[in-house]
Amino acid sequence: MSDREEKPASMKLWGGRFASGPSEVFERFSGSLSFDRRLLEADVRGSMTYARELHRAGILSAEERDRLLAALEEIRREAAAPDYFDGADDEDIHTFVIRKIKEKAGEAAGKIHTGRSRNEQVSLDTRLWLRDEIDRGLELLVGLEEALLALARRHREAVIPGYTHLRRAQAVLWPHYLLAWFEIFLRDAERLRFARRQGNRLPLGSGALAGSAFPFDREAMARELGFEGITRNSMDVAGDRDFVLDYLFAAAMIMLHLSRLAEDWILYSSEEFGWLELGDEVTSGSSLMPQKKNPDALELIRGKAGRVWGSLSSLYVTVKGLPMTYNRDLQEDKVPLFEAADELNGSLEMMRVVVESADLREEVAARAVEESWVVATDLAEALARRGVPFHRAHQIVGRLVLESVRAGKKPKDWTPEALAAFAPEFTPEMADLLDPAAGMRTREVPGATGPRAVAAALEAAEERLREFKP
């Protein structure tokens, strides 16, 4: 067969305009079944709704409708087989499904595409598929949040060093640190919900770009498929992938945050920090060095972030120069979308297991706090509360730290008498603030690390998370 020999018309959803078929090279280059086969469930679901609407519009008889619905249901069942697509060389998932319908329903299959364009069909399939994927991502994100809160409750009173510039800065409660991640991931959940809303509109009835010429009840189809409403402009629908980009941006942000959390815990579980222990189930060893316990799960999450960011960049650049309505470039939205969803959901699932496996070595974290001068700000603020100008208070405490570093003294080495002797502005009772726990008790404004503030924040977090549960 030459590379320009005409192929049977039944293998294409188009062809009458052409004297000969596409070349074998073009077939290979342009085919998408290898990846868009993941849309089969969505394509079948959308086609079932469309068949019912064709009957309501008088295009299909009741018998034809039922035959098509039975064929589509059979395809849905058969698709569970792992070898279902073996040997298929159809142009895309839409062509594949219609071929399967024809095998089962005969000539009635020829009517299923009446008034429908693949432009709106692929938009519908992608919206349905992505909506389910976002729901799965939200479920995984909520699971991660629950694991963070459980770990916070397990060490309610533990004190750890808080860092700026990766230097010990101020003492904070361990739950306060974990609640920071809770806030970050809750914002991510909002981003996913926004992306879901953006794509949750029915495109059917838009045609190729000018809208349908048939009297379809678009609102009824939207209700049947669980959409919030219908799209408002047929030309917009044909070229719209904003809802995919919204999801990819949300996914990239989540991966950014997972990567940052991974970096934190890689550091905190290292010998140099040593106050976080990762479970054996999320770490691995070295083929050469018997002593190693490597944070592989976290390193993989950190690495996979780049792939999701690449997916966002890839589609963003693909779409940026496209003229209005559909262009074949948009076929290239599937691979980055599918890859991002896989990597995101896999990373969220993995991070939850990491969090569930982790344990805080409270005594090591407390020692790191006590050995450092994380109480310096507490002392300066105590002076300020006594009327010392803060700049002056800062200077006094800075000199105290310098003297201590030179003499090798830790905060607990200073007695009330020695502290008062160092500078007349100090009073003996200020020595209480050399205990990091005392300084934290001064920080009880909402959002701070004081014990009462943190306890209230934990309770509020539980309540806020319920909003995101199904």
Image (cartoon, rainbow, N blue to C red):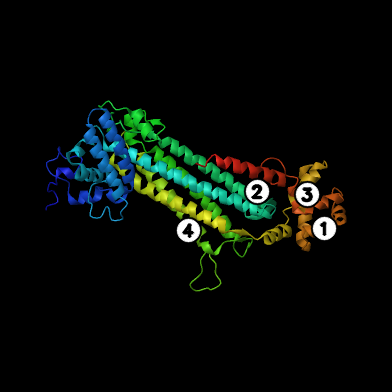
| Front residue of this view, candidates 435 and 466 | 466
| Front residue of this view, candidates 249 and 127 | 127
Query: Residue under circle 2?
Result: 176
Of marks 4 and 2, which one's residue comes earlier in the chain?
Answer: 2
Left or right: where does residue 106 sit relative to residue 316? left
Q: Report the mark closest to the observer, 4 or 2.
A: 2
Which residue occupies 22% across, 35% down?
63
Q: Is residue 397 visible?
A: yes
Residue type pointed to by label 1: Trp
Residue type pointed to by label 3: Leu
Of marks 4 and 3, which one's residue comes earlier in the chain?
Answer: 4
| Cα gap from disc 4 to disc 3, whole angstroms | 42 Å
Query: Residue under circle 3?
Result: 379
Query: Residue under circle 4?
Result: 300
Q: Which mark is residue 414?
A: 1
Mark 4 element type = helix
Is 250 located above or below residue 51 in the figure? Answer: below
Q: Is residue 310 visible?
A: no
Of marks 2 and 3, which one's residue comes earlier in the chain?
Answer: 2
| Cα gap from disc 2 to disc 3, whole angstroms | 21 Å
Is 150 located above or below residue 285 in the figure? Answer: above
Which residue occupies 12% across, 44% down?
20
